[in-house]
Image: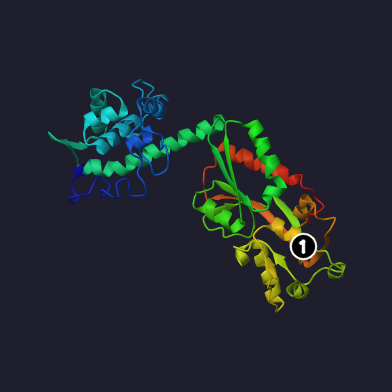
């Protein structure tokens, strides 16, 4: 185990204990092995095969960053990304020989590059002993900065590669729950026709749940009904707006626009039972009732908006839903509709993590979503 000046006994470099190995000064460090593997999976760093390692070292060796040529790219002071890679490998593995073996290069080559790095910095980074390498104070200072530099270099390479081609990878996208009826079938089929090598993972959730999943990185982006909790998120301009109306089989209940008072007295069937008033539309209905001095208590709560409409079509009760969804499901021959008073319009927008770099595949999918929403019709829009 590597130790260095200023580290207590039992700690590893970067303030890591055995159980906390891999925890950096600012989050998880990008070690040399992890970089060589191109981070096979978040939180998982294993020893690469020879073929994997040679392929995943393209950032430094195949892109001319680490080539020994007069055109070699270098950082300030003449240090190169290749040298920083070798430095991190030596830190991680405890010796030059073990680091060279992990990177499938000759030890003299690795030792020479670290010597050049020390020369360009003007300070030694390691104290060489018979059994192990020990970081000097300068080496300890360089460690987190080397990790950050290589992480930034990898991100830059990935962004350029993504702009160039859509071959591989996964689109991870979330939508409001009823999108499966409105657009997902045609959307996914069209995307796969255009990009058959890109995997697609589309999750239909309540909009509040989509926001949570995008915020914690489970999903890359989402299409949600507003408003949602936008902490840590970027919210786009509205990409679609539709009117939510009162639906009933009873003609006497749809003679005029429905006020908050009449809504509070109606035999309502409301969807999103698990989320309740955290759902954007239900929250807006509740606010209307409360401002008018009434309590909104549904007679029936179900999870699916489609089920709520189906039950209303059978005369079990009445519901509030978007006209495009009711039409898509084919229930408008049995249901009568009337606007709310005042009218209620549902607004939909894209959300992404704040300042996140979106993959090209996700950007393409979002463009296709916008086009599909535009085809849903304008008769239900304000």
Report which quarter residue 168 is drawn in: top right
Image point (72%, 43%), residue name: 372
Residue 375: image location, x then y, percent? 76, 44
Foreground residue among 350 and 156: 350
Is residue 330 found left or right of 115 in the rendered image?
Answer: right
Q: Which residue is mark 1?
A: 312
Image point (84%, 58%), residue name: 334
Image point (80%, 50%), residue name: 378
Please state, as top left, top right, bottom left or bottom right, where the C terminus lies in the image.
bottom right
For the view shown, which residue lies furthest in the top direction? 69
Report which quarter residue 291 is drawn in: bottom right
Is residue 262 found left or right of 28 in the rendered image?
Answer: right
Image point (70%, 78%), residue name: 294
Q: Is residue 293 above or below residue 325?
A: below
> For the residue labelled by badge 1, is the local secondary structure a helix, a strand or a loop?
helix
Q: Tell me the crowding category of disc 1: few under 14, some 14 to 19, or many 20 or more residues within 10 angstroms, Cα based.
A: many
């Amino acid at each position: 185990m590597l130790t260095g000046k200023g580290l207590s006994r039992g700690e590893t470099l970067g303030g890591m204990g055995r159980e906390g190995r891999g925890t950096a000064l600012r989050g998880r460090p990008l070690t040399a092995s992890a970089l060589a593997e191109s981070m096979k999976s978040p939180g998982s760093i294993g020893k690469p095969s020879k073929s994997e390692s040679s392929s995943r070292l393209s950032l430094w060796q195949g892109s001319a960053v680490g080539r020994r040529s007069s055109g070699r790219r270098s950082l300030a002071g003449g240090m190169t990304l290749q040298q920083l890679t070798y430095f991190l490998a030596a830190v991680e593995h405890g010796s030059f020989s073990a680091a060279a073996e992990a990177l499938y290069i000759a030890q003299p080559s690795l030792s020479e590059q670290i010597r050049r790095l020390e020369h360009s910095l003007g300070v030694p980074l390691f104290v060489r002993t018979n059994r192990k390498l020990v970081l000097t104070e300068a080496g300890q200072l360089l460690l987190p900065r080397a990790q950050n530099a290589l992480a930034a270099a990898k991100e830059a390479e990935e962004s350029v590669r993504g702009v160039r081609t859509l071959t591989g990878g996964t689109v991870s996208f979330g939508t409001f729950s009823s999108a499966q009826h409105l657009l997902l079938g045609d959307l996914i089929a069209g995307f796969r026709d255009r990009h058959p090598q890109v995997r697609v993972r589309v999750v239909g959730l309540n909009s509040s749940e989509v926001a949570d999943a995008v915020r914690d990185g489970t999903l890359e982006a989402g299409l949600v009904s507003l408003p949602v909790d936008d902490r840590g998120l970027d919210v786009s301009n509205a990409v679609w707006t539709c009117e939510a109306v009162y639906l009933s089989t009873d003609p006497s209940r749809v003679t005029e626009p429905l006020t908050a008072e009449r809504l509070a007295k109606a035999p309502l069937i409301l969807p999103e039972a698990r989320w309740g008033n955290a759902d954007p539309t239900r929250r807006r209905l509740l606010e209307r009732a409360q401002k008018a001095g009434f309590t909104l208590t549904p007679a029936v709560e179900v999870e699916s908006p489609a089920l709520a409409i189906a039950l209303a079509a059978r005369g079990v009760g009445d519901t509030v839903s978007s006209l495009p969804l009711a039409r898509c499901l084919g229930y408008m021959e049995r249901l009568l509709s009337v606007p709310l008073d005042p009218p209620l319009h549902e607004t939909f927008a894209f959300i992404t993590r704040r300042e996140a770099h979106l993959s090209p595949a996700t950007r393409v999918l979002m463009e296709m979503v916008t086009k599909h929403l535009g085809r849903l019709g304008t008769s239900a829009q304000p």
